[in-house]
Each structure stands twice: as C-alpha cells, then as structure tokens.
Image: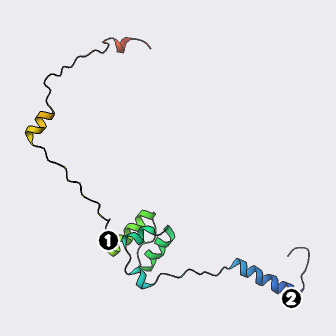
C-alpha cells in the first residue's frame, strides 16, 4: 500500500475484506453420477458450453470443440438421437401422370434475342 501505513488491526481487517471479495464462494454443485447417468435429449440441448464441457469431463469424454460437437459426444455416449419429427408421406406418381404433367403439346419456343448483342459496345 503505497505512501501510507495502516494500523495492524486495520491491515488484518482489510486483507480479510479483500480475500472475501476476491475469492467468491462457489455455490454451484458438481453434477452427480445419478444426474449424468440418465440425461435426456432435452437436458443435453439446454446445457451451455461450460456445462457441456463439465459433463464431458465427468464422463471422461473429450471436452474440447464446439458446442455442437460436445452435445454430439454426450448424445452418442447416452445413445440418444434427434427426436424424430412427423414423416410426410409423398404421393407417388405413375409414369402416365408424369408424362401428362410434362407434356409439351401446344408449347412453342421462339428465340427473340438480339443476334448482334455480343458485338455491340456498351
């Protein structure tokens, strides 16, 4: 402390205040084996990057990479896949229906472009 001295009692009190402000108490608990042994698809997708890293480390998986990569490792570890969405049934067309839809009867093509376009200056 530059330029002045504190009384010994004041020095002790101030150092305790500094240590209290510098070393915050961590209230977050580490994930237990019970919670990480049965994670769902939705729970994994709600985790932030650092939480994904902690889960990967606790399961002894590689904990580096993008958020998507970490989620993928956890999903693979738990044998989870993306929740499937409804499958849309596409109607099947017969060859006759396709031929009818693609018929060119009555359609003519006429080239109306300027044949000298390439030679004209801009």
Tally of numbered tags: 2
Position of the N terminus by quadrant: bottom right
The picture places residue 72, in percent across and down from the top left corner, at: 37, 67
Q: Quadrant of the C terminus?
A: top left
Read off the residue under disc 2. Answer: 9
The image position of residue 7, as x and y in percent, is: 90, 85
Q: Position of residue 29 (x, y in %)?
A: 53, 82
Q: Nearer the viewer, residue 81 or 84?
A: 84
Question: Pointer 1: what residue?
Answer: 80
Q: Quadrant of residue 103?
A: top left
Q: Nearer the viewer, residue 120 or 95?
A: 95
- Look at the numbered disc 2 and give the secondary structure of its residue: helix
Q: Earlier in the sequence, mark 1 or mark 2?
A: 2
Helix, strand or loop at label 1? It is loop
Residue at (13, 38) in percent of width and height: 98
Judge the density around disc 1: few (<14), some (14-19), many (≥20) Cα neighbours within 10 Å. Answer: some
Residue 56 higher or lower than 85, as above or below? below
Query: Could you tell me which residue is drawn at 30 percent across and 15 percent down?
Result: 113
């Amino acid at each position: 402390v530059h330029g002045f001295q504190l009384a010994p009692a004041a020095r002790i009190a101030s150092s305790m205040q500094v240590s209290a402000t510098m070393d915050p108490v961590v209230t977050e608990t580490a994930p237990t084996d019970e919670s990480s042994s049965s994670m769902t698809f939705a729970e994994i997708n709600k985790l932030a990057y650092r939480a994904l890293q902690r889960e990967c480390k606790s399961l002894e998986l590689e904990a580096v990479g993008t958020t998507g990569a970490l989620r993928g490792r956890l999903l693979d570890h738990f044998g989870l896949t993306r929740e499937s969405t409804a499958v849309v049934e596409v109607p099947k067309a017969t060859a006759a229906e396709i031929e009818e839809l693609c018929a060119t009867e009555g359609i003519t093509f006429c080239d109306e472009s300027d044949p000298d376009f390439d030679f004209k200056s801009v």
